[in-house]
Image (cartoon, rainbow, N blue to C red):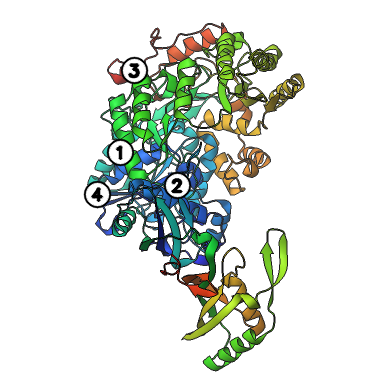
Amino acid sequence: MGIKLSDGLLKSVEKPSRYTGNEWNSIIKDPKTINIRFAFCFPDTYEIGMSHLGMKILYHLLNERQDCYCERVFAPWTDMESKMRENNVPLYSLESKDPIKDFDFVGFTLQYEMSFSNIVNMLDLAGVPILAEERNAGAPFVCAGGPCAYNPEPLADIIDFFMMGEGEEIINEVMDVYGGWKGTGKPREAFLEEIAKIEGIYVPSFYEFTYNEDGTIKEFLPLKPHYPTRIRKRIIKDMDKAYFPDKIVVPYTDIVHDRIMLEIFRGCTRGCRFCQAGFIYRPVREKSPERLLELARKLEESTGYEEISLTSLSTSDYTGLEPLTTGLLEDMEERKVNLSLPSLRIDSFSLDLMEKAQKVRKSGLTFAPEAGTQRLRDVINKGVTEEDLLRAVSLAFNGGWNGVKLYFMLGLPSETLEDVEGIADLAYKVVDVYRNVPKEKKGKGLNVTVSTATFVPKAFTPFQWEPQDSIGNVHEKQMHLKDKIRSRQITYNYHENKLSFMEAVFARGDRRVCKVLVRAWQMGCKFDGWGEHYKYDVWMKAFEECGVDPYFYVTRRRQYDEILPWDHVDVGVSKQYLINESKKALEGKITPNCRVDCGGCGAAALNNGVCG
Amino acid sequence: MVNIRVKFRRGEEVKFISHLDLMKVFERAIRRARLPIAYSQGFNPHPGMVFGLPLSVGVTSEAEYGDFEITDDSLSMNEFIERLNEQLPQGLEVLAAKQRQTKQNIMATISASEYVVMIGTGHECTEKSLKAGIGKYLSQKEIIVKKKTKSGVKDTDIRNMIFDLDFGLQPCGTFNMIKLTMLVSAGSKANLKPELLVESLFEMLGAGYEIDRIHRSKLYVKVQEELLDPMDGKVL
């Protein structure tokens, strides 16, 4: 009964196969036999959404259930959106092409803040009321999860309920409750009341905030005494037993990550203080090499993909890397499958491994020192020294590589011009290393690329109390660095930091920024993550109209005793630990890798007291 | 090493994927089917696969062709078809496969294509008036259209690219559906897109129109001035 799109419409838009479904391994069910229909929405384009591992897992997991049909929905690109609006075509799912406003659930995955305006736009395009309070009987439940759900408040007026943490178990528990509620004729609230008892579920309409005169939060109040005041995230304890699909949808059109993604572990032991992922995904839990080899074989067989990529926050930290890669190379040799190894730390083992795995030209290697001086690297707890880096590039140059990408952040807490100049110094030292490598060993034509991003302080990190550096300051630092880099062998990339400003608002925003989001969308904001669509001035006007001061969220230093908008969410890492880390940061004291010395962050409690 | 020519169908479900993406679909289907396809040497091995004339996005076809190189002489054509079809998405289906001896691949030899184009028009027309109109259209010495080329829009005479043009008329309420069956030049030397023919025809008729669907029904290769089916024994 799905929507029929005319040929003329589809021919008039870019890459129409993004909108027609029918890909290999996509799931086709008869909706008439289904009790629960779930629209899994990714608030960005098909190419980006289809590259997201979490969606692949939960899509197949939900479809394992006989009573449930999970279908995929992506944000149509602007050309398709205007055609849909012109022709009164509502947002539909790729599998059945049914309008999603008739589904039981519309679920969004929140991967980055700058996709929030697309959520509003997609709900509108679907014909689903944007605000939770406007949804009545018959409307779908709008839910959300993913890393940005840990600070749920900027979306509190829109989302009916959030699922905190890893979704594999909690989503099934919610579906079970829904199966019991559906058809009973009980009100929507009754279902929400029921799932609020599940660990990890947060129903924002069950709580209210009061504020102090200075705008800070006074109190977070449950509307009924039995609502939980702390929402604890969910984790999967045994990664080998966790559900993982043995087939995944193979798209027709090129997507960003068009390959098998093999998730080797969750969490990270490094404790870099700027990195939200490093804290919210704790504790570290690995899959065994045996399980991964089994999955790789099954996935290769079911997809026909020609490339497998290892996925994690830090490939080199995987304790079974050697047996896993040896096994994969052995298994996949005959099948002509390439192995790609992102986020490897460069040492002789990994260079050797790359040589074996990737039969590609030795062009570029990527390093992320993040800061230009040892002092600042200690502040952010990036456990990399200048010697480490120079030794690694020397190994790489001696092995024939001739391109190096260096990633840094500008605007880190306590940063001075000396730290900024340190970035240029480091790049010049890399050039010197190349010069000293014998001619016969190194590749021709050195190319060092320095890229800087603007630091955005995030919730649940030791820097969550820090102000973001102002747009003007960061711009000055960019210009200063540009001025310092005057070698033809070094390219400097940077971008406008007005986007980072808005990201900073939503990364640490509270409930009051939600109306700004809706207003900005009304004024035409969407696809903010796409440079050509981001409208900073319109956003600023929306803040002004709503009487909300964005600087309150971006450039203000918070006090340790301030109630933060996300304090009611429990990611495992304690606030006291983050305070200690914050203090250590400003003293320039480092914290060792969790495997060397447990820092007692608190996350171990989630996993029966065991990490790794 | 065995060379195989394959004829396949491309239906509604897959008519919006691009030519490049279609090749990926076949490559992955062949990998899943574990068919012994030959790979090229070098850094980036490519499977031995060549496809005929690319089909425009939105067009269906029952006459698509591809040449495959496989390494196992003992594989029967039936088994090849069966195993590949099991791994192809809905809408793609191998209809026939034959061994070929000819060195010329399909891409290089295609010279004509037959299309069936369904056109809706609000213009009043009868069998008789259409017959006269098409007769007049074909009697022109030259038919100049604006053809898009790599270097821009160019005036091109397409008369010599039209070999045959037939029609059927289906009244449909206040609307007339016209079914045009056309045999036109195709391939690397001269290629006429059906849309261009339709555009110039209706311009001459002075009628508004809308193309409802385009379907490729046949594809021909030329052997000694004779148009032949690419699967014909004389071709292979």
Measure how far apart labels 4 and 2 are at the Cα level. Answer: 42 Å
The type of residue carrying mark 1 is Lys
What secondary structure is marked by label 2? loop
Q: How many marks?
A: 4
Labelled disc at residue A176: none
Mark 2 or mark 1, which is nearer to you? Answer: 2
- The structure residue drawn at horizontal position 60% and vertical position 70%, both measured from the top left corner, is B192
The residue to which callout 3 is attached is A612
Check the residue under mark 3 and report the chain it is in.
A
Residue that carries the numbered disc 4 in the rendered image: A67
| Mark 1–mark 3 distance (CA, rounded to whole Å) | 26 Å
**Is label 4 on the same chain as label 2?**
no
Q: Secondary structure at mark 3?
A: loop
Residue A457 in picture, x, y percent from top left:
55, 23
> CB of mark 4 within 8 Å of CB of mark 2?
no
Residue, disc 2: B47
- The mark closer to the camera, 3 or 4, is 3
What's the CA distance linking mark 3 and mark 4? 35 Å
Q: Answer whether residue B32 is visible to the viewer in this image.
A: yes
Which residue in the protein does label 1 denote?
A: A298
**Which tag, 3 or 4, sits closer to the chain's start?**
4
Note whether residue B115 is visible: no
The image shows residue A293 at horizontal and vertical percentages of 31, 30
What chain does badge 4 belong to? A
Q: Is residue A99 above or below residue A239?
A: below
Mark 3 residue type = Gly
Q: Horizontally, is B108 left or right of A51 in the view?
A: right
Three-letter amino acid code at the position of disc 2: Pro
Of callouts 4 and 1, which one flags the residue occurring earlier in the amino acid sequence? Answer: 4
